Image (spheres, grey):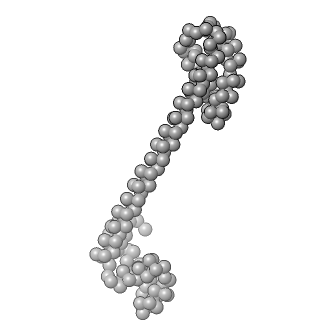
Amino acid sequence: MDYSKQEFEHLFKDSYPHMYRMAFSMVENADDAKDAVHQVFAQLWRSKPQMAEDSIRGYLLAATRNQCLHMLRSRQLQRQMEEELQRGMAESENEEREDLLRQLQQVIDSNLTEQDRRVLSLHYDEEMTYEETATVLGISASAVNKHITRSLAKIRSTLKIAK
């Protein structure tokens, strides 16, 4: 084949529609199909393989098919890598959360009084209001507020958490 600029442009104009349709049917995305066809023509221009005129169209279709398969494999690998990354991030976040919960429980067990722990448990674990907590423990709602405020301050200062 002659690789003059005019011949190449003629080949491009003649072959592009067939190559694009095949690429689009494989990758199911217009931009990716265009990219695949352009990649094939760019490679053809760079390498300028010597072949007979009657075999160039078959070569272009085969090269387009191969380029599309390469794109599909790349997409699949990218999806797998993204999934792995997300799994790794989720596992890391879970480990951090569990570590923080262990630290929190240790602070609660070692720095708070039994009454403080009961108030926190009823209010946060059992989701009781201040009044309900006060009724269960036989103390006033303002005492519940004081226990919670003092307990949270101790926890923050021990864990060095900003308000």
Where, by quadrant of the figure, is residue 71 drawn? top right
Q: Position of residue 9 (x, y in %)?
A: 67, 14
Rendered position, 43 above or below 85: above
Where does the C terminus fall, quadrant-wise? bottom left
Query: Which residue sits at x=71%, y=17%?
Result: 14
118 vs 141, nearest the viewer: 118
Query: Which residue sits at x=68%, y=9%?
Result: 6
Where, by quadrant of the figure, is residue 91 drawn? bottom left
Q: Position of residue 32 (x, y in %)?
A: 61, 32
Where does the N terminus fall, quadrant-wise? top right
93 vs 112, nearest the viewer: 93
Residue 14 lies left or right of residue 110; in this view the side is: right
Furthest residue to the bottom?
138
Rendered position, 34 above or below 155: above
Query: Which residue sits at x=70%, y=24%?
Result: 17
Q: Work out whether residue 87 can be spotted.
A: yes
22 vs 158, nearest the viewer: 22
